[in-house]
Image (cartoon, grey):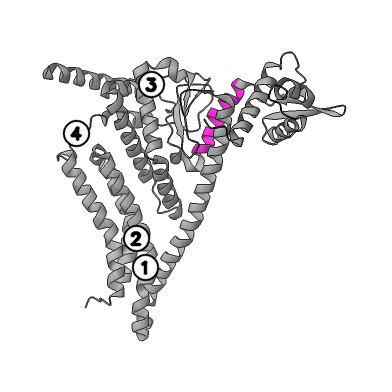
Amino acid sequence: MLVLALVALALLLAWPVPRALARVTTVRRGPRAALVLWQSTAVAAVLAALFAAPAAVPWLIGSAPRLRDSWPVLAVAALLTGIVTVRLLVSGDRVGRNLRSVRRRHRELVDLLATQGDGHTRVLEHTTPTAYCLPGVRRRVVLTQGTIDRLSPDELDAVMAHERAHLAARHDLVMEFFTVVHEAVPGFVRSSTALREVHLLIEVLADRAAVRRAGVVTTARAIVGMADGPKPAGAMAIRESTAAAKARIELLEGGRVAGLPAPVASTLMYAASIVLVAAPLTLLVLAFAGFSPA
Amino acid sequence: MPSTPRNRLGDLERAVMEELWTSHEAHPDGLTVREVHDRVGLDRGLAYTTLMTVLDRMSKKGLVERERDGRAWRYTASSSRAELTSETLHHTLGELAGDTRRTALLHFLDESTPEEIDELRAALAELEARNSAGVRATT
């Protein structure tokens, strides 16, 4: 029964699949394809959940008497579709608004305090080495003076290339999409390992841009230089873990994915992504085409 | 950068903060709108009321504080430049992280232990060795 298949697909893609995929760390060596694979997993999960109730419609119209036996399945499907729809809308609105207002306020403070470098660059007078970007129309790359003092010019180049890659590829939108889906999933199902993994992949992609610009060794030195700089008193609210920095250094060079040459592995991941997104679509189409397995 | 009204407002706020910070030692009680206008507004050909509006807005944002002095308000910066910079980096960035943590794409590093930093350096050394070996092999 196709409704049941959609429900099962949504649950699989929301729970065991992301957890399993996060463990396959070898795919990090093909970061772009891996990121697409993660995105299609999320999209397919959402589609399967949204299609579950609609898929029951043709079947309901066709044979009302069967309602008596199968109402539990229909109830589950309706519940799933309903909950996911509402939660997605609420989460999308909340995440988007929150993020933009916090970013705007932060950008205003940066503009008030920082000295302007070239283009979108702003420099804050602070000793902690830090670099980040504020995406959006009025985008900024923010560096601290500590970063400039600590890194050599070519290491600084690597850092700038990394941040510009984030801005150019709108990595913030990828993260925003995942955060919306993440928060739309009920708490007991959601897995922050998936979010962390996606974040790491985005960093690896930006690092690749830095490597193209400044070379592997320089980029690695820049990552380490940012890591062991002076720390201000008081805990920083958010900092990347040293483990993540180490993972990034180890991933700078690329290489084989699961023993396969990277292009082959990437092609396989793209193919898997297509299959994933096609699955819920196919199930819905079959439901409307009146297909019913004997 | 094109001089949009929003940019001009940002520049004005910046100039006002700058003025409040630099004059803080000489005028610990702060400056009146008239004084700020004399120092910041006149050169720019701005009206007194423009400065009044800007200062009012800035006090609503918490950037400046004001106290009654007879019939006028005296404005001071809420925090020094250094304090505001730390606050921007810690607090606001923490907010950026907050519940939308991973959306921020930040590159802060954790309060790492010396061992972890050593591991990081070892990873770098390995990579450096590998790459110099690679260079030698190909040349």
Q: Chain of mark 2?
A: A
What residue did someone put label 3 on? A156
Q: CA distance from mark 1 to mark 3?
A: 50 Å
Q: Which residues are magenta?
A: B82-97
Give a yes or no on whether discs 1 and 4 share a subunit: yes
What residue did someone put label 1 on? A52
Give a yes or no on whether discs 2 and 1 share a subunit: yes
**Residue B50 or residue A53, whichever sits in front:** B50
**Residue B20 or residue A177, whichever sits in front:** B20
User: Residue B48 in the image: x percent, y percent?
Assistant: 77, 29
**Quarter of the figure with residue B39:** top right
Q: Is residue B84 magenta?
A: yes
Q: Earlier in the sequence, mark 1 or mark 3?
A: 1
Q: CA distance from mark 4 to mark 3?
A: 25 Å
Left or right placement of residue B96 versus residue B34 in this view? left
**Quarter of the figure with residue A105:** top right
Mark 1: which amino acid? Answer: Ala
Q: Chain of mark 3?
A: A
Q: CA distance from mark 3 to mark 2?
A: 44 Å
Q: Earlier in the sequence, mark 2 or mark 1?
A: 2
What residue did someone put label 4 on? A255
User: Residue A160 in the image: x percent, y percent?
Assistant: 39, 26
Q: Are marks 2 and 1 in contact (CB under 8 Å)?
A: yes
**Quarter of the figure with residue A263:** top left
The residue at 41%/43% (across/down) is A175
Mark 2: which amino acid? Answer: Ala
What residue did someone put label 2 on? A10
